[in-house]
């Protein structure tokens, strides 16, 4: 029985690590996406861009999934007069996700 309990604890630990990594990847993805959007809106690559990126990260807690993040960025870009399609936003979000995964798994 000890072996079974050890394996169960190992699986639980692996699951927890995977969940934490996925959370970190999503947060990093949203930050990178926010920095991209900030650049499109003409915000400097300094404190203003970082502050905007933080609002994009926070927007992900509104509802499950990525639609809340897409919607927030689309509204903000539209308010700044930057035309962007839903497909372009989703493509950039996917690129940011790949970059976030690379950054967090290679370090």
Image (tube, rainbow, N blue to C red):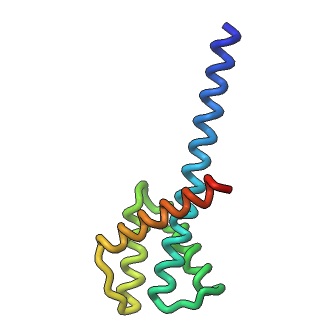
Q: Quadrant of the N terminus?
A: top right
Where, by quadrant of the figure, is residue 14 drawn?
Answer: top right
Is 102 located above or below residue 42 in the figure? above
Q: Is residue 43 left or right of residue 73?
A: right
Q: Which residue lies furthest to the top in this view?
A: 1
Q: Nearer the viewer, residue 60 or 30?
A: 30
Is 54 located above or below residue 80 in the figure? above
Is 66 located above or below residue 20 in the figure? below
Where, by quadrant of the figure, is residue 74 drawn?
Answer: bottom left
Q: In which quarter of the image is the C terminus?
A: bottom right
Q: Which residue lies furthest to the front in this view?
A: 106
Is 12 located above or below residue 72 in the figure? above
- Residue at the image position 37 percent from the left and 80 percent from the top: 75
Count all numbered tags in the image, as a single digit: 0
Q: Position of residue 32 (x, y in %)?
A: 54, 71
Q: Position of residue 92 (x, y in %)?
A: 41, 70
- Residue at the image position 42 percent from the left and 67 percent from the top: 93
- Residue at the image position 62 percent from the left and 21 percent from the top: 8
Q: Which of 21 and 101 is in front in this view?
A: 101
């Amino acid at each position: 029985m000890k072996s079974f309990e050890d394996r169960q604890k190992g699986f639980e630990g692996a699951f927890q690590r995977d969940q934490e990594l996925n959370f970190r990847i999503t947060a990093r993805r949203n930050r990178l996406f926010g920095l991209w959007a900030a650049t499109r809106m003409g915000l400097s690559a300094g404190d203003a861009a970082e502050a905007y990126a933080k609002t994009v990260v926070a927007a992900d807690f509104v509802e499950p999934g990525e639609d809340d993040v897409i919607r927030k960025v689309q509204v903000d870009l539209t308010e700044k007069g930057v035309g962007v399609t839903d497909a372009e936003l989703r493509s950039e979000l996917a690129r940011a996700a790949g970059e976030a995964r690379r950054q967090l798994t290679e370090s």
